[in-house]
Amino acid sequence: MTLAEFAEVAVPLPVKTTFHYRIPAKLQTQAAPGKRVMVPFGPRHLMGTIVGFADSSPFGKTKTLESILDEEPVLRPDLLELTRWMAQVYQAGWGETIAAALPGPLRRARTPMKPRKQEEPPPATPSQPFKLTAEQQRALEAVLEPVQSKTHEVFLLYGITSSGKTEVYLQAIQHVLDQGRDSIVLVPEISLTPQAIERFQGRFGPEKVAVLHSGMLESRRMQEWNRIRSGEARVVVGARSAVFAPVRSLGLIVVDEEHEPSYKQDDTPRYHAREAAIRRAQISGAAVILGSATPALETYYAATSGTGIHLLRLQERIDEVPLPEVTIVDMREQIASGRRSRIFSRPLEDGLTKALTAQQQGILFLNRRGFATFAHCRKCGHVLRCDSCQISLTYHIATKKMVCHSCHASTPVPDLCPICKGDYVRFEGTGTEKVESELSRLLPQARIDRMDTDATQMRGSHARILQAFSAHELDFLVGTQMIAKGLDFPRVTLVGVISADTALNLPDFRSSERTFALLTQVGGRAGRGKMPGRVIVQTYAPHHYAILAAKTHDYQAFYRQEISIRKQLNLPPFCRLADLTVRCTKEMTAREGTENLAKLAKELLPAGFHVLGPAPAPIPRLRSHYRWHILVKAPGIDAMTQHLPALLKKFRCPRNCRLAVDVDPL
Ligand SMILES: [Zn+2]
Ligand SMILES: [Zn+2]
């Protein structure tokens, strides 16, 4: 029951303000923050959410609330506060952010159903807590301190691969459950395998665990949301958006593989789930564990410079399994010595043959899909490109099509060059399909499958391939980063990285960090059982510090080098970035708009800020839109949050253009 005259309502539009509506007498008893309402909005009717009350309205003429949709608020105060904070920091509308926090049916004016009886997920094998090693025990005790006192603390659990981070999470969660509180475990989408989920269900029982990820049917997701909200499920395991899980009493959030780029949402609100998790835990007085073998530079810097994150280390592998031996192969030497194959060096070919003979398994990793990564005419030099994005098209042999990896448009393979009509179109560059086909040519008797987004399009095929690999019905698995994480197969003794250079050569200041993390992760798939593992990394840059550090499993060495470069160039964590991109179908308009934006930014932003650009965006044309951008460097996130809105308010985006703002872009 409210006695206020007006409700403050956030509507799901890209606007920075909330709107005031008069509460009619008949709705006075029902109105409450976090409930969805129908409101008149210009000529339309919109669904919004009550975010607060007011005794007066700053607007002269105020419309009236039409109806209230919920009996109980769909957002409790902690999630209302989280969405408010996210909208402010990531420069999005509060209503848009609320929409992102709700499951699909609730964005469309449906009412939450009563929880239904849980359908049976195959039964998980029950598991008991393992005896912890001394370092695991120390880490657990450190985390339990704030858990017991119900205070907010953030920990970085920095542990090498196979050091038993998950067991620490599981035992910490058990304590939180014993307190009658709830936990959220965030896992990168591609690591959310049945194997990973079973570890939580096996320990706590399937009825206590809810799973949330983007591949779920909406109805199933809604059902899980209801189970969490009703208090039936007390442990939530999910991808990025599970940070919005409607738990009743939050005690702990785990962000596993906290360095993963997939924690960043690439559409409005462009939030980072790690930052959102920390903020949510702070609101609720909960503890946070950030887990990683290769922490994000920002996180490790915060944990070692006394800025609010406690560092916990796990440096021993469980059962003292040694780390795999890493061999770096200089591909320049391979080519110079007359070797014809640019896909398999001599050491990799030998390693593959040996693994097959010994009835062991191998993983071949390449972060590029398709067969050939571009096609060109050897007569006139023309490269086949996407009409709307201008990036080169990838040849996919399975579908016999040229595909744009940016907008997914596909075209048939031309018989003749579209420019000179010559018969000289040739395919170049290697993707996973080609690795698979070359491998079966090299070892015809080997049983091989491929795992990438093309091969796993069909629901369930991901699990099917892993099942076959686990049952040793396959000798080799070829794949993209989909196979880099979480897979735990004791027969895998060889991991081959076809090219470490694909990630290294990206025009991004994080490319070294990505390469080091990827090599460490994919290498960690080798030698997890009793047999020692071996990793072969092929590269044209064998002396790069990221590759050398991966060879010696030396995160510290990598970190020291990388952090000094970041400091020198004033890049994160020494500043915060915002990317402001203007896109338009007319290149001139996009360019001029961005020039005006840059000029205005230089005028308006105070000392300590830097404006880079204007320049064409890293993908200069996407779906027929030209994209120009500027980068804003701020001394800190508070300064960014304080000063960016004035710039965005003052900037007049040219007609038919759109401005996209990405704070902390990846
Ligand atoms: Zn040609
Ligand atoms: Zn395209």
Image (cartoon, rainbow, N blue to C red):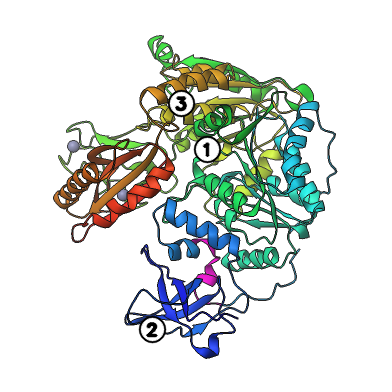
Q: Position of residue 361 (x, y in %)?
A: 66, 29
Q: Where residue 67 sits: x, y (%)?
A: 50, 84
Relative vertical location of residue 349 with respect to residue 382 in this rendering, above or below: above
Report, in whole angstroms, how far the alpha carbon at label 3 lies from the one at label 1.
13 Å
Identify residue type, mark 3.
Answer: Ser
The residue labelled by disc 3 is 499
**Which residue position holds label 1?**
481
Residue type for callout 1: Gln
Query: Among all residues in the image, which is located at the extreme top?
Result: 337
Element marked by disc 2? loop
Q: Residue at x 53, y 17 (%)?
A: 557
Q: Mark number for residue 63?
A: 2
104 within the magenta span: yes
Tag 2: Cα neighbours inside 10 Å, few (<14), some, or many (≥20)? some
The residues tagged by marks 3 and 2 sit, at their Cα atoms, a distance apart of 62 Å
The residue shown at (56%, 20%) is 556
